[in-house]
Image: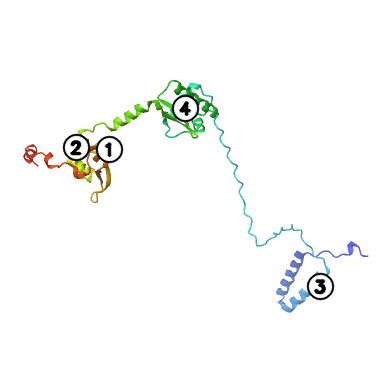
Amino acid sequence: MSSDDDQPAPISWEALAAELAATRQEAERRGEDDPVAWDAVAAELAARVSDLPVEVPDVAPVPVEDDGDAAPALAVAPEPEPEPEPEPEPLELLDPAELQGGLEALLFVMDDPVDEDTLAGALRCDVDQVRTGLAELAAGYDARSAGITLRRVGEGWRLYTREEHAAVVERFLVDGQRSRLTQAALETLAVIAYRQPVTRARVAAIRGVGVDGVMRTLLSRGLVSEVGSDPDSGGGLYATTPLFLERLGLTSLADLPELAPLLPETAAVLDEHPDS
């Protein structure tokens, strides 16, 4: 049995390459760079390599991916930590007088019923305190027979006028609609009635003054309305409404009195306006 000392030393590939290069340089120097000679050298080296163990350098193993066709993994940036939510403002315990005053102010400016949560958020107080304040506010209106009352409608609260005062409110509204028209409004209405459909600019030119304010009054009373636009100027065309005929007791515009008898004599106009 042979010992480890009898084993040939492992071959060094660096030493073999150096020896091969030196042999080739010596052959070139002698002019013996012959392929046949190189074949002999290669055969000799092959015989030597087959009898000697190969020295394998220590190289760290390279990890091999399981899927060679897979795309290289991209570096993923860590997700930013979510910002902490701001802490809600602490709720206050309002004084009863301050609570009812705030509730009354909010209800006064609201056009629609408003729920208790919305009121509590505006006042920054607890919903239970708002609920108690609303009940006390409604009871206070009822106790002194105030002109307004607080009612719960659906899921919200709203201020209303008290039913006992309905006649006063109705009389005010009706009398306001029946108030007399000014002289300027009557003159403007007459121009529209006889020249309709007519533009606002034409009415102003006939009267010699601006008619914007008067036209707003006539429109709000429902005596005139816009019926189209002038094809030449693009301005709105205005005409009287059925309410106008009803107020005058007329069946149609044909029942309007003749305009000629209402006009001044030509001679009088020339005396007042000699340049016309």
- Which image quadrant: the N terminus? bottom right
Q: Which residue is mark 4?
A: 103
Q: Disc 1 marks which residue? A: 216
Distance between the alpha carbons at the discs numbered 1 and 3: 120 Å
- Label disc, if present, on residue 47 of the rendered structure: 3
Q: Residue at coordinates 89% horizontally, 62% vertically from top-left?
A: 5
Q: Is residue 231 above or below residue 2?
A: above
Of marks 1 and 2, the one in the foreground: 2
| Mark 3 vs 4: CB contact within 8 A | no
Q: Residues within 10 Å of mark 4 (few under 14, many from 20)?
A: some
User: Where is residue 153 shown, x and y percent of the image?
Assistant: 47, 33
At x 81%, y 70%, the residue is 50
Which residue reaches farthest top?
Answer: 144
Say whether residue 239 is left or right of residue 82: left
3D distance between C-alphas at marks 4 and 1: 36 Å
Asked if one can make out residue 194 in the rendered structure from this viewpoint, the answer is no
Q: Secondary structure at mark 4?
A: helix
What whole-number distance in Å separates the C-alpha atoms at marks 1 and 2?
14 Å
Residue occupying the point 18% across, 39% down? 207
Marks 2 and 4, how far apart at CA? 49 Å
From the viewer's perspective, is the residue at label 3 or at label 4 nearer? 4
Q: Earlier along the polypeptide chain: callout 2 or callout 4?
A: 4
In front: 27, or 54? 54
- Give x and y (percent) for residue 155: 50, 34
The residue labelled by disc 2 is 187
Q: In the rendered structure, which amino acid carries the disc numbered 2? A: Glu
Q: Nearer the viewer, residue 62 or 226?
A: 226
Q: Secondary structure at mark 2?
A: helix
Q: Going 29% across and 33% down the picture, which residue do you hit?
A: 177
The type of colouring in the image is rainbow
Kind of residue indicated by mark 3: Ala
